[in-house]
Image (cartoon, grey):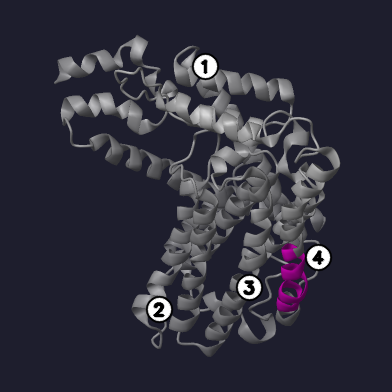
Amino acid sequence: MLWGLAPWFRMGKSVMILAAQSIADFLAGITEVIAPGKGLQYVLAAVIHAVLLVHAFALSPAIFIWLERKVAGRIQDRLGPTRVGGLFGWLQSLADGIKLVQKEDLCPPAADSLLFRSAPYFVCVASFAAFMVLPFSAGWVAVAADCGLFIILAILSLEVFGIIMAGYSSGSKWSLFGGMREAAQMVSYEIPLAICALVPVIAAGSLNLGEIGGMQRGGVHNWFIFHDPFAFIAFFVYFVVATASCKRAPFDLAEAESELVGGFHTEYSGIRWSFFFMGEYASMFAVCGIASILFLGGWNTGIPPLDDALYAARNAGGSGQGSAIVGYLANVLGMLVFVSKAALGVFVQIWLRWTLPRLRIDQVMTTCLKYLVPISCFLFLGATVWPLLLATALQRSTWTPEALGVRAAAELRESVPAAVVPATASGAVTAVEARQESATEGAVR
């Protein structure tokens, strides 16, 4: 067995994982030696993906909690954390985590113990599961689903069950009121959130987040925020409703301080209390990551020569015609661009919290139902009519000379694995070529 595994660890084969379409593809050769035909590579790939996503899920709240304190300190003309971890206090979040772990985990006598203890996990799992279909770069996604946007919005909406369970099971009417108010706010704001997210989907013609991000390659003018005036406005409406759906200020007064104390999590302490905020900060990164992919080019830099060079490097590395390491580094740069855009969105959400006054719960609901829902419906209708207006006036469906279908076809070529269908007697073409022809024909039409 060791003799059979040896060739896979030679220097010439050590970069295969960089060129593989997925981790499962890379592991297939190794697992076939250990357990032929058992599908072990998919189990190992799932474990690797889960470990990577857990680290992303756990690190993002720690970083953003530190950022929240530093931003709040600067806005309030103070320093924020400075002592723990050196000059910038970057270990303050870790120190707080250690403190919360050491605190006693209390459960009120009147509470439903099972529901009370499990509610924080529902919130965390909903936020964590959203990372499964969120692409961090071209092809770097745990689950590359064709309906990825639908899945991620559906998963994020499950967080409301944890909120309701926490308020209902606490045995306190104040926690119950806070949970019901928070649930009403989250459910209401999910409607304009989904409608605004559909505006760039209309332009892209796809729910696959990887394809949507790839279509925006070639310059800032190709980002969907500049696709039409309705998409431009939809980005800002989306950001507002995403901030509210994450229970962030100025939309975070569901607890109504004077009467409900801490809202649905009033009775929680220690590590379970921190789980609610881990889920909140992770959801902030998730919704900002969705905004980055739908409107701001995803992992594309917006510099045409650089984007084209990175695109060529990824294709060459994935097909084996170029350096796999260069293609891997191109994806690393794309990931850094994507994370930077999402982190900038989180920074703006933090900025808004410490700048704007908070709204009463009735004003929060009025803003959603009376203003944001009609505005999002108007933007959705305008996005559907816009291509027809351009086709009538300019004889094309976009304001740029290059048709969007051309970029969609190019992205499809990159996303399809280079698998070859066995040739028949008549000389059948490969599966990739067949899909490329179909995509090209659709682009021409």
Is 288 on the left-hand or right-hand side of 134?
right
Query: What residue is shown at x 70% (from left), y 42% (from top)?
Result: 296
Disc with the residue nearer the chain's start (4 vs 2): 2
Indicate the secondary structure of the residue bearing disc 3: helix
Is 65 on the left-hand or right-hand side of 100?
right
x and y percentages locating residue 351 in the rendered image: 76, 55
Query: Label 4 is placed on what type of residue?
Result: Leu
Q: Is residue 323 visible?
A: yes
Disc with the residue nearer the chain's start (3 vs 2): 2
Task: Read off the residue under disc 2.
Answer: 107
x and y percentages locating residue 434 in the rendered image: 46, 27
- Residue 39: assigned label: none
Of the residues tagged 4 and 2, which is closer to the observer?
A: 4
Query: Label 2 is placed on what type of residue?
Result: Cys
Task: Read off the residue under disc 1.
Answer: 316
Query: Label 1 is placed on what type of residue?
Result: Ala
x and y percentages locating residue 307 in the rendered image: 67, 25
Of the residues tagged 3 and 2, which is closer to the observer?
A: 3
Disc 1 and disc 2: Cα gap in Å? 57 Å
Of the residues tagged 1 and 2, which is closer to the observer?
A: 1
Neighbor class of circle 2 (other Cα within 10 Å; few <14, some 14-19, many 20+) is: some
Task: Read off the residue under disc 3.
Answer: 188
Disc 3 and disc 2: Cα gap in Å? 30 Å
Task: Read off the residue under disc 4.
Answer: 356
